[in-house]
Amino acid sequence: MTKKALITGLTGQDGSYLAELLLEKGYQIYGLVRRSSTSNLERISHLFNQIQIVSGDLLDQSSLMDVVNDCQPDEIYNLASQSYVPLSWKQPALTAEYTALGVSRLLESIRRCKPDAKFYQASSSEVFGQPDESPQTERTAFRPRNPYGVAKAYAHWMTVNYRQQYKLFGCCGITYTHESPRRGTEFVFRKITRTAAMIKLGLANELKLGNLDARRDWCYAKDAVCAMWMMLQQEKPDDYIIASGETHSVRELVECAFNCLGLDWQDYVSVDPAFYRPDEPVQLVGCIYKIKAQLGWKPQYSFQQLVELMVDRDLKELSDNP
Ligand code: GDP
């Protein structure tokens, strides 16, 4: 029988890759999209005739109940949220409405309308904030340091609580930064690969960055969505860290991207304090022992391969359409 999956956040980076993966696996897909006067469907435009768009909003309980009731999905992936950390300081209450309470509403809809559905909640390494230990494991204490991290911590614990209290099949995947050519250029990885490609083509002549010593655990978004799907194929629900398990600095990233293009980064990069963060998390890096041992998942792309892939794609996109 054809499996049915409901994806929230379908129009985002992860939603679009997950939809592609599930289509390959023969799923029927419903994508929850909130009504808006401006369209943001470009990441999924190539999938339009293969998925069903359903209208609903994480802020609205009754719309979620209707969607879950009508679609009767076997699997639900909650990838929607207000996910940009700096914006969470400017709009803390709205961030909590979507990222925290939105999950409560979704869990309630599942409990009432499709209690045997399997549920994936997109947790984030931001729940660790300033962690006591590095690398972090599934047992590391949550000490979020921004409104986004606080909201994600609430959503994580609500999912765990619904699993314990109502026996829902709810799983949290604690993802670290994951990138792809579909990532927005406000994030440093794509900003660097995009600008390096522009410099190569003579479309830009400098790249201004913040803290070059900041380190992150970066993996490929396609690898991450594969882990999400694998988590819901288990017999028992559980929570897992999804990460590369290694960190690299912004300096290494910039050097690697410019090297791919035969350029010396030091000729083009300058440091601009405007891009410095007031409060950087210390050494966020995930321990991927559990997901490797229990699910047999590991990233398919190395850091170097990911940089090369993104630089190539940006170069091609800009050459085709400067
Ligand atoms: P996130 O903070 O993990 O959501 O991802 P970002 O890609 O926005 O930032 C990753 C790291 O890169 C942070 O530690 C930033 O301080 C650092 N960084 C250095 N220069 C820049 C820059 O120009 N833009 C951004 N976004 N981050 C920068």
Image (tube, rainbow, N blue to C red):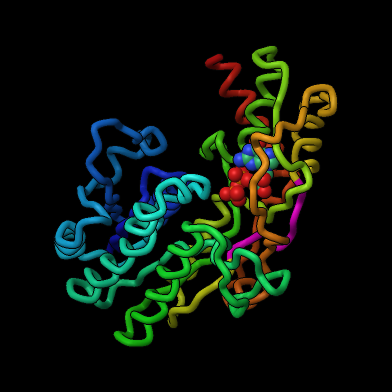
Q: Residue at x 18, y 75 (%)?
A: 112
Residue 38 against residue 154 in the figure, above or below = above
Query: Which of the image's four quarters has the C terminus?
Result: top right
Q: Residue at x 24, y 72 (%)?
A: 108
The location of residue 50, given as percent across then percent down, is 30, 43
The location of residue 308, given as percent across then percent down, is 71, 37
What residue span does the magenta drawing correspond to?
A: 242-249
Tell me which corner region of the image, top left, top right, bottom left or bottom right, holds residue 168: bottom left
**311 and 216: which is toward the camera:** 216
**60 and 51: which is toward the camera:** 60
Please tell me in which quarter of the rendered image ligand 1 is found: top right
The location of residue 2, given as percent across then percent down, is 28, 62
- The verdict on residue 106 being magenta is no
- The verdict on residue 248 being magenta is yes
User: Can residue 18 be spotted in the picture?
Assistant: yes
Residue 158 against residue 226 in the figure, above or below = below
User: Can residue 189 be spotted in the picture?
Assistant: no
Q: How many numbered tags mark residues here?
A: 0
Q: Is residue 54 left or right of residue 177?
A: left
